[in-house]
Amino acid sequence: MSDTPKKNTSSLVTILLITLLIVAPIVWIVIFKTGRHLTEKLPILFERTVDANGDTIYHTIDDFEFTNQLGEKITKQSIKGKIALVNFFFASCHDVCPEMNRNLQEVYKEFLKDDNVIFLSHSVDPEHDSVPVLFEYSKRFGAEAPKWNFLTGSKEKIYDIAEVSYKLLANEDRENNSFFHSENIVLVDKEGRIRGIFPGRRGMAKDGIPAIIDAVRALEYEYKQQQ
């Protein structure tokens, strides 16, 4: 009996295995590196109005001016044309804030060489979180300004922008000498519109960090489609 059928079968299996080894990494890149929801447009969140021309006007973040860990002024104009990831913390916090910023660090690493993405972390305790304190704190996460800015400034303006612009909680409990702030991370598009709010702590939502990365990539894809 001829061995030809067996040889043909063996060759076919070999070809299939080689094809799988080549295709699998490509599929992985398409799914996990370019965004699992790449073609799904992200929602634009919060209130909107219609002007006299019938055009929809969306909620956008207000103008601001804060100081980062290098003593540089960061304003709304500074982040114009950037996709921003925003959160709130304070340096003396020992549980929620380090965990949230470590998670944000993973996203930061993913977009480290992407000039379209910027990070804004606001201190809710600006009286103690001076520029030198924020500089030392930022080093814990390998953060370099102006890519990742740890911001201080007027407490009133920080709390105001948290609640009014980013729709997050931020306030102070003077009796217990403690601070309340949202544990969420806000995704802001190049027009200053809020396109997503994500849990900043691991375990608060399934695939939290990949979901943020995925959303940023989907937003970038949206802008590419507009070109």
Image (cartoon, grey):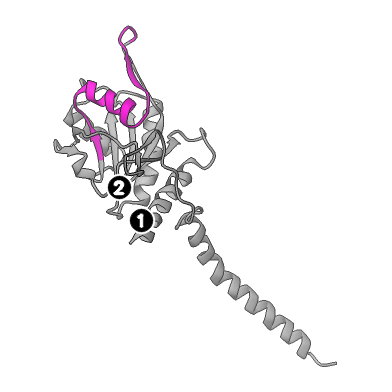
Report which residue position mark 1 lands on. Answer: 223
133 in relation to 16, above or below: above
Residue 218 place in picture, x, y as percent = 43, 52
User: Residue at image x 48%, y 40%?
Assistant: 208
Number of numbered markers: 2
* Amino acid on which the number 2 mark rests in the picture: Lys
Q: Residue 140's image quarter? A: top left
Residue 56 place in picture, x, y as percent = 36, 42
Pointer 1 and pointer 2: residues touching (CB < 8 Å)?
A: yes
The quarter of the picture where the N terminus appears is bottom right
Count neighbours of disc 2 (C-alpha within 10 A) and say few if under 14, some if 14 to 19, many if 20 or more. some
* Amino acid on which the number 1 mark rests in the picture: Tyr
Please check the rendered image and state whether residue 18 is part of the magenta-colored stretch, yes or no: no
Label 2, secondary structure: give it. loop
> Magenta region: which residues?
149-176
Give the camera-side residue of 173 and 83. 83
User: Residue at image x 19%, y 24%?
Assistant: 154
Count neighbours of disc 1 (C-alpha within 10 A) and say few if under 14, some if 14 to 19, many if 20 or more. few
Visible residue check, residue 45: yes
Visible residue check, residue 145: no
Residue 85 place in picture, x, y as percent = 34, 41
Give the camera-side residue of 129 and 154. 154
User: Residue at image x 57%, y 70%?
Assistant: 21
Label 1, secondary structure: give it. helix
Report which residue position mark 2 lands on. Answer: 190
